[in-house]
Each structure stands twice: as C-alpha cells, then as structure tokens.
C-alpha cells in the first residue's frame, strides 16, 4: 500500500487529499465520518477538565464519537463541539454542558485508521457472519451502550441503566454477566434495547439501522438485528 507523505496525525484536508489520490474519488469530512473514521482533538490539561486526565498525563488525543457531535460535523458545522469523549484511560466521559468547543482545523485522523479505510476500499472482504458462542452474545457493557446509543435519546442514561426499569431492566434489554464477572455486573442486549428505544422513545429506525451497519461494537449482533427487522417488516 502506498503510504505517501500522510502524517501520523493528519488534518482533515490532508486526509481527504491523500484518500482522493489513492482512490481517484473526492473526499470530504462527511465522507470520512461515513467511512467510519474517528476524528480526534488534542486536549491539554486544564483544571476545568482535570477529570479527563490520569495522573501524570498533560496532553492526549480525545476521540469524537458521540453521534450528535459527529452528525453536527457531517452536517457542515463551522466548529467542533465535544459533549462526550474518552478520558486518557480510554473510559467514556460525559462532559458538563455545554461541552468543549474547538476550531474545525483542530480535527486529526490517525494514519493507521486512514490506511485501514483505504485497505477496505481497495481490497473489500466478504463479510462472513458466524454465530459466536452464546456467552459472547449475552450483551454489551454500559460503556458500549453509552457509546453507541447515548446520543439518540434525551434522557439520563446513567440513571436509566442503573434503575433496571422498563426497557433498561430485566424485563427489557438487561441481562446478567456470568457469575465469574460478579453478580451485580450487567450487560444489555443491543437488539432488544434498540427496538425498545424506537418503540418507547421514538428513536428513528434509520438512526438505529445506521448504528448496526457502522458501529464495531454491534458487529456480532448484525445478523440478529437484520432477522428482527425482517420479522417486523422493516
């Protein structure tokens, strides 16, 4: 694969230019996001956002993955708004409103991620959906729920997931991890949760379909999701 002169942390312009050269097609920020690339911004330590930094860390690249933040960028926003990210320990962190605002040219894309996108374009692999062991398919973690679905409904997700009520509880999408993981640690079935979000919170089915089509955390559940859609006539 031709690496060219693409930096390890490329700007949006550098990323689009390089991919255009390699593929012979035009690229823009919206297409980068649609292709699954995660933009990052470099955050410097500040007292206001000290909770994002582990001891001894003063600067790190914070990912932008919250669906409302990425949709805002794809729609042509003139700046970057970060309302949820991961801290320097890679744990999901919800920022206090209004979040962090940065100039659009602060966005950076990792060389390895860009190279993977190009590899998938030039050498597409036929997806083989194999049924993983049932233990793996029990559910997704709270952090994965927040990462995938957190921007789709305006509610207190932390409180809702902890309450065990309605679609978030044992009578809805919540399942229990195996005993070795601790009796109070739960997982959520993303297919059941997604259908509940559509039914109870009116989350558009188009948003949910896109999540199952693009989110790596949901890849093992894609076949189950498509089967459910077929049963519903969607």
Image (cartoon, helix red, strand yellow):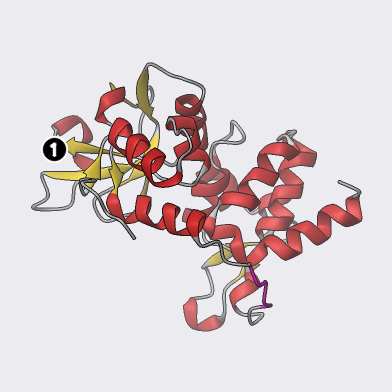
Query: Would residue 52 be seen by someone viewing this image from the given angle?
Result: no
The residue lying toward the viewer, choosing from 222 and 50, is 222
| Residue at image location 44% in from the left, 53% down from the top | 117
Q: Which residue is mark 1?
A: 45
Residues rendered magenta in the picture: 127-131
Q: Main secondary structure of the magenta part?
A: loop
Does the magenta segment cover residue 185? no
Residue at the spot 52% in from the left edge and 68% down from the top edge: 184
SS for dot 1: loop
Name the residue: 44% across, 59% down. 119
Q: Is residue 130 magenta?
A: yes
Q: Say above or below: 5 vs 227.
A: above
Is residue 212 left or right of 13 when viewed as pictured?
A: right
Closer to the camera, 102 or 85?
Answer: 102
Instruction: Name the residue located 52 percent from the left edge and 30 percent from the top edge.
Output: 71
Q: Nearer the viewer, residue 67 or 172?
A: 67
Position of residue 175 relative to residue 165, above or below, is below
100 with respect to 36 (left or right): left
Residue 91 in the image, given as x and y percentages of width and height = 34, 53
Residue 83 placement (x, y as % from top left)? 40, 32
Q: Quadrant of the N terminus?
A: bottom left
- Up the image or down, 102 lies above or below 12; here it is above
């Amino acid at each position: 694969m031709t690496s060219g002169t693409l930096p390890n942390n490329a700007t949006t312009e550098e990323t689009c230019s390089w991919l255009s050269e390699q593929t012979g097609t035009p690229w823009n920020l919206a297409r980068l996001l649609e292709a699954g690339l995660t933009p990052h911004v470099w955050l410097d330590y500040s007292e206001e956002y000290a909770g994002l930094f582990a001891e001894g860390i003063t600067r790190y690249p914070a990912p932008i993955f919250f669906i409302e933040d990425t949709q805002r960028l794809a729609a042509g926003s003139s700046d970057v708004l970060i309302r949820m990210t991961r801290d320097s320990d890679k744990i999901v962190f919800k920022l206090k409103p209004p979040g962090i605002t940065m100039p659009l040219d602060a966005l950076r894309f990792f060389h390895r991620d860009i190279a993977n996108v190009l590899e998938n374009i030039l050498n597409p692999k036929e997806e083989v959906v194999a049924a993983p062991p049932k233990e793996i398919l029990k559910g997704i973690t709270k952090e994965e729920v927040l990462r995938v679905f957190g921007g789709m409904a305006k509610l207190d997700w932390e409180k809702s997931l902890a309450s065990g009520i309605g679609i978030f509880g044992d009578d809805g999408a919540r399942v229990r991890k195996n005993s070795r993981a601790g009796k109070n640690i739960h997982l959520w079935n993303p297919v059941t949760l997604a259908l509940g979000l559509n039914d109870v919170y009116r989350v558009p089915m188009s948003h949910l379909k896109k999540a199952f089509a693009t989110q790596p955390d949901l890849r093992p559940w894609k076949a189950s999701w498509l089967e459910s859609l077929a049963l519903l006539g969607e």
